[in-house]
Amino acid sequence: MSHWRRSFAAIPIAALALAMAMSATALAPGGACAQTPAEPTGPVQLTGMRTWVSPAGTRLVLEFSAEVVPVAPDSGAGPQLVVAVPVPGITAADGVPASLAVNDSAVTSVQAIYDASGVRFWVKLAPGATFKVVTVPPGDDQRFRIVVEVSRPGAQAAEDRRLASIAAAKKKNRTRLVVIDAGHGGEDMGARGYGAAEKNVTLSIARQLADALNGIPGVKSMLTRDRDFFIPLHERYKIAEKAHADMFISIHCNSSRRRGHGSGTEVYFLSLKGASDQADKDLADVENAADLVGGVAPQAEDDMVNVLYEVRRSSMLERSQLLAETLLDHMAADRRVDARGIKQAGFAVLKSVEFPSVLVETAFINNPQEVKLLKDPGFQQRMAQQLATGVKAYFAKAGVTLSPDSDDSAGSGSR
């Protein structure tokens, strides 16, 4: 296979397009074929070439001003990958680099090579790395993208060992583990307003919540992400399951369709029968679309949630409701943000039956008054402290004993 890929890299784009014309259909998320896009109305440009590094590997995103048909294998392994875009006259927009020196343990470098018939992206991979290539259709404020997901060799095994170590330390020290999920990340910006991006605000609050929880005797915290990278929705709660978490809190910022009209904070727990109202359904749809934004195929419904463990699921929904009520009670102490209540919706990230789970909408990021609060470090710290106090109060209400650490040598840590 590696010999074929070396030959592939040397073929001109026009010849590539002719040789692979029968298979030159766009790759949909998950590798499924999609219809050939309509001809662009103007010159096509490469508007972005960027990488995001995560514990699992490296994500390369190629962004275009119009839909294109990439010519590339949909998955594989080897020392290099070539993604050809046979669009005559394609150019790079101002500021888009011709090459990227990544030099992590998954991708070495990326180079764009232009000629009269199009552009080739030459991705040099680290030894043992594997890749998947998908396309992401444009939507809302997102342009058409080709996403190359490169997995670092041994990354999943190393992550599983890390989470098993956290679970073992939790059991040994008899601590309660709270997993904090900073919503969105990487290519998935989340909601935006007045110069703020949801993915940055949620990470800042999540970090401060983790610190606040670690200050409570008998409680430890862990972040699903501790920096700016993308995690598929179903992976977020599975991280918590592997670490044997006692609680899962996903941090988000709300947004209204009409700028400046929404306000307040609210806490959601899972609904299996639909959302509380249309606005809640719309919000859940937006949050559940994060995988599509990030270039991940839609997940089939989790059989564990929909078929098995009915009694356990009912118990966890009750606990999730109690957690949501307790957190909102403490968040409402800050009079600068109104409490909008406890609600239910079908958020994909809340679909574990192993622990109580909630999604916190801290405030409206496209509200001119509330976005100032969301960007204020003092407000973020206050929000984190209120949530931490709420977590402690929940454990007391639920009859959960918090035992001081006997040994924290292993630690809980971040992702």
Image: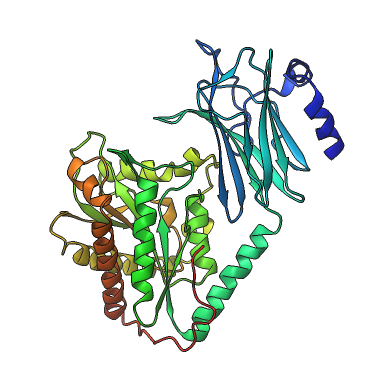
Q: Residue furthest left?
A: 335
Nearest the eye: 388 or 378: 378
Give the residue drawn at x 26%, y 35%.
257
Identified at 73% across, 19% down, the residue is 13
Q: Is residue 4 visible?
A: yes
Q: Nearer the viewer, residue 317 or 85?
A: 85
Residue 300: x %, y % from top left: 53, 47
**Residue 278's spot in the image, x, y percent?**
27, 41
In this rendering, the answer to whether 358 lies above or below 174 is above
Camera-side residue of 388 and 139: 388
Above or below, 99 against 103 in this view is above
Q: Quadrant of residue 393?
A: bottom left
Q: Nearer the viewer, residue 65 or 24?
A: 65
What residue occupies the far top of the structure in this picture? 41
- Against 310, is 188 above or below? above
Q: Position of residue 158 (x, y in %)?
A: 65, 64
Figure quadrant of the N terminus: top right
Whether residue 308 is visible to the viewer of this picture, yes or no, is no
Left or right placement of residue 128 versus residue 315 in this view = right
